Every structure is written in C-alpha cells, then in structure tokens.
Image: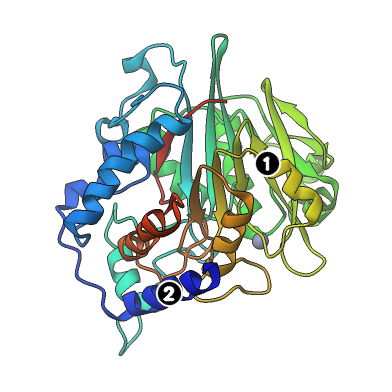
C-alpha cells in the first residue's frame, strides 16, 4: 500500500510537470499569502472545491496542533507588521527564509533557454509566486518573557536575498545565532553577508558548527575565522565560532538537539530538534540511532528534492514519504534545496504537488504539504 501510493504520487507529480496551468490568482494574493502564511497552505488557483474544503478543515486543526496560540499571527505576512506595531512578542515563530535548491528557483538557465519553456521556473520568476525558492534556511523567532532571539539555521549563498525580502516584511532586525547543518555553499555561503549586521546592527554573531565543518570553514572562510589576515580597516563579518558535538546544546535558552544524518555516502550533516519540531534539510539516509531522537515529533520539516527518485545526497519524494510513515510526525512540511519542500526542484509545481500530497490525508491520514519561502508558522518552543 505505501509503495503503491508512493508510486501514484510520483506519477501524479510527473503528470503535473506537463499539465501545468498558467497561474491566474491575483498577484497580490501570491505575494502576500495572508492566513495561509501562518498555516502552511498558500492560496491555490487550481485546486478542486473538495480540496479547498479539505484545506480549510485542515487549516484549523493543524494550526492548533503545533501553535501556542490558536490562530496567532494569522495574516501577519499580509500586513508586514513591525515589532514596534505589535508590542512585546510572546509567540515564537518559525519562518522559512528559503526552501529551494543550491542554484535556486527559477533557474537562470531555464529562463534563457532558446527553445524550451520551463513552466515552474516561468511561474517562479514572478515575485511572490510560491515556486520561487532560495537556498534552504529557517529562522526561529524564539520569544521569551525576557526577550526574543532570532536563531537562524544556515546562511547559504542567497541569504542576502532572503533577508532582503523577509527581514523587513516580518519586522526582523538582529541575527542572534546561526546554527550550521553542514559546510556546503548553500548552507554557509552567506556568512559573509552578516557583515551588514555586525557593522551596523550588533557587535557579533555566534555561529554553532560541528568540528568537521569548522575545519572546512578554516579553508573556505579563513578570513572570518582568522581575522588577523584581514587588511586593517577592512570590515568583515564578526563571528564567534562555537564548535558543537552531536549532543544537545543551548542557544539563547533554547535546547537544540542535533539529528545526525547522512548527506551522501560517508558525509555527515546535522538536522536539529527544537522542542517538538524536527528539521532535516539535507539527508540521503537516517542512521538507526537518530530515529530515537525523532520520536513524538509534532512538526517534521524534511528534505525532498525530486518528485520521482532520491539522489545520492538527497531524499526524493517517495523515500521522504516512507520516512514520514516511519517517523509518524503530526504534520510534515517538505523542503528542498531543489524545489519541493525545503529543497525543491523546478520539476515540481507547488500547487500541483500540494494537491497531490493533500490526497494522502484522505487515503492515509498523513498531513503533508510543501513549504515555501516566507511561510511563517506560530510554534511552541
Ligand atoms: Zn526550470
Ligand atoms: Zn549539502
């Protein structure tokens, strides 16, 4: 049954590749998903009335399942509020700064192709379209009575572009910590951009990184680690490096549990657990001992790069669905350094895939959707 269902989804996804409809939703609705931004269901111009009803029903249920306050912050993406407008913030939030592949969606090569039209990239070129995806990254806005800390997971090559869009829109100012999953360019390529923060907002940014990735960064970011090589007067990001082990650590009073996974043969990457939220952005296999750390997960955010198959370094959708059935989270959001969930490819149209995934709720009771850049969810940390 699971294998057959997986195949059906993959087939449906592939059909979606060639039967995409032109986007017809009002541009403003695409740019500012409003309530959908807080619940994980962007507006759809193509879904059936039945699926729209299902989404409405699920919106209430799923929002309550992992929100500290039912309906909190709903519509906030539409208003683009600032912290000043809303006063002291006690609701923690999870914000998807990026949900795409290393090269981003749209691909420039698709938009410049002399003879072929890539429908997903064409849609993604429209500002605010959910198919537009930058390097995978999330920001946890950890709110406590004593203050709010903005904890970033990864700052990849497109961090500047993500921050440019979402920091002003969501009233974000500081970067209070960066936790690194691994040392590929789409996870650490934007650390250089933090110079704007450490020059103009705050004195420094603490970075939490595994020893093996710190060793890589001594080569790739040598001038950020050994600042004595910087020409006097030149400004670079002022980073404080904290080497972490594969055991729990604290960041601004938030316990972070590393989730060691394989990201290609012999190459380790880290997912992270924050309360009952598990985030695994780059994974090709999960070691048996890590499953224990995934028990009783309420929200799983997981890599799903392609609609049809896994690659040597990332889960494809069928494998990701197998893992969801095994881990049994209450809700799952896929992300893809390609274009599906956290890493999603241009092979997948956001709304089409989401409609197909929504059917898994009817057939198996699985609550799974794709994430998208700018998705913002109230969470309990
Ligand atoms: Zn494309
Ligand atoms: Zn990677």
Q: In the visual, does 35 lie left or right of 347? A: left
Q: How many marks?
A: 2
* Quadrant, the C terminus: top right
Circle nearer the N terminus (1, 2): 2
Q: From the viewer's perspective, is residue 191 above or below residue 107? A: above
Residue at 50% x, 65% y is: 338
Q: Residue furthest bottom?
A: 115
Secondary element at image label 1: loop
Per the model, the C-alpha gap separating discs 1 and 2 is 28 Å
- The residue carrying mark 1 is 295
Q: From the viewer's perspective, is residue 47 above or below residue 34? A: below
> Residue 200 versus residue 215: which sits nearer the camera?
215
Residue 342, percent from left and from top: 51, 55
Residue 241 visible = yes
Q: Residue furthest front?
A: 1
Secondary element at image label 2: helix
> Residue 210 versus residue 299: which sits nearer the camera?
299
Residue 154 visible = no
Residue at 63% x, 66% y is: 314
Which of the numbered marks, if any, corresponds to residue 373? Answer: none
Residue at 40% x, 53% y is: 361
Q: In the visual, does 157 lie left or right of 209? A: left
Residue 291, percent from left and from top: 73, 49
Residue 60, percent from left and from top: 32, 34
Which of the numbered marks, if any, corresponds to residue 8? Answer: 2
Residue at 81% x, 50% y is: 289
- Badge 2 crowding class, 10 Å Cα cut-off, few under 14, some 14 to 19, many 20 or more, is some
Q: Is mark 1 within 8 Å of ligand 2?
A: no
Q: In the visual, does 286 lie left or right of 32? A: right
Task: Name the colour scheme.
Answer: rainbow
């Amino acid at each position: 049954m699971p294998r057959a269902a997986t195949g059906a989804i993959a087939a449906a996804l592939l059909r979606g590749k060639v039967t995409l409809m032109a986007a017809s939703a009002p541009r403003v609705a695409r740019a500012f998903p409003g309530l959908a931004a807080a619940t994980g269901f962007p507006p759809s111009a193509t879904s059936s009335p039945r699926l729209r009803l299902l989404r409405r029903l699920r919106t209430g249920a799923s929002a309550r399942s992992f929100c500290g306050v039912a309906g909190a912050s709903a519509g906030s993406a539409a208003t683009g509020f600032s912290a000043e407008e809303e006063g002291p913030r006690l609701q923690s939030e999870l914000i998807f700064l990026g949900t795409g592949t290393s090269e981003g969606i749209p691909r420039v090569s698709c938009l410049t192709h002399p003879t072929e039209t890539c429908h997903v990239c064409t849609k993604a070129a429209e500002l605010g379209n959910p198919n537009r995806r930058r390097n995978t990254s999330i920001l946890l806005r950890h709110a406590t009575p004593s203050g709010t800390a903005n904890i970033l997971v990864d700052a990849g090559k497109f961090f500047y572009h993500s921050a440019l869009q979402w920091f002003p829109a969501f009233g974000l100012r500081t970067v209070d910590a960066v936790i690194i999953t691994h040392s590929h360019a789409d996870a650490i390529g934007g650390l250089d951009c933090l110079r704007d923060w450490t020059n103009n907002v705050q004195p420094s940014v603490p970075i939490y990184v595994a020893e093996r990735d710190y060793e890589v960064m001594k080569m790739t970011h040598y001038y950020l680690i050994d600042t004595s090589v910087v020409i006097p007067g030149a400004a670079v990001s002022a980073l404080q490096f904290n080497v972490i082990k594969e055991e729990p650590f604290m960041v601004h009073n938030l316990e972070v549990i590393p989730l060691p996974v394989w990201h290609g043969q012999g190459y380790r990457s880290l997912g992270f657990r924050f309360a009952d939220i598990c985030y695994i952005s780059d994974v090709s296999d999960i070691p048996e001992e890590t499953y224990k750390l995934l028990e009783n997960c309420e929200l799983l955010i997981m890599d799903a790069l392609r609609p049809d198959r896994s690659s040597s370094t990332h889960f494809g959708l069928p494998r990701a669905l197998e893992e969801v059935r095994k881990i049994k989270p209450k809700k799952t959001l896929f992300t893809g350094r390609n274009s599906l969930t956290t890493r999603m490819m241009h092979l997948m149209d956001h709304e089409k895939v989401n409609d197909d995934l929504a059917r898994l709720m009817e057939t198996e009771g699985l609550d799974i959707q794709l994430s998208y850049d700018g998705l913002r969810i109230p969470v309990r940390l």
